[in-house]
Amino acid sequence: MRARWVFMVVSVFIILSFYVVGHAEDIIEQNIEGGRVDFLEENLIDFQEDEMLPEDDMGIISGAIASIDVGAKTLTIKSDEAGTKTFAVDTDMSMLWKGAMMAELGDLAVGDVVDASYITDDDGSLVIEWVEVVPEDMIPPR
């Protein structure tokens, strides 16, 4: 008798679970269709694919800092793969990292091994998005 009672309770629980899950999906769809998801719309970023840069306008470079000009806000990186490139450093946009700390252009040093991401500006100049100084213990031996 007890086994039959447990079986009935479990069966009812399973049936109710399927009903609740199905009903919840209907409520979510109705709220989305009815425009009652305002809290989501306020937090969404208006993203348009045509605003993305073409892949040719973005790049990553790894190498050693060859020169730094704090006054002109430029950084030159010498890479085995990409050669030597000079980049503009935009103090409002570029993020510089030395270890876990954010850095200023003057905190970097010639010879520091870095990984960097950059974009090509409309005028053809290369602009740093971010630079990360590679910790010495992470630099592979040559």
Image (spheres, rainbow, N blue to C red):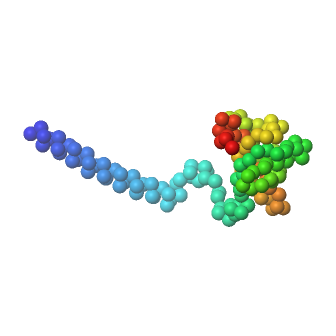
* Residue in the image at 64% along x and 58% along y: 47
Q: Is residue 12 found left or right of 96 in the rendered image?
A: left
Residue 134, compared with residue 56, is above or below; it is: above
Percent coordinates x, y for residue 101 in the rendering: 71, 34
Q: Nearer the viewer, residue 89 or 114?
A: 114
Snapshot quadrant of residue 100: top right
Q: Quadrant of the N terminus?
A: top left
Q: Nearer the viewer, residue 8 or 104?
A: 104
34 to the left or right of 68: left
Q: Residue at x 70, y 46 (%)?
A: 115
Percent coordinates x, y for residue 27 in the rendering? 42, 54
How many numbered marks does the figure carry? 0
In the rendered view, does 91 fall on the left or right side of 136?
right
Q: Is residue 104 visible?
A: no
Work out which residue is located at the far left of the displayed protein and give it. 1
In front of the other: 66 or 9? 66
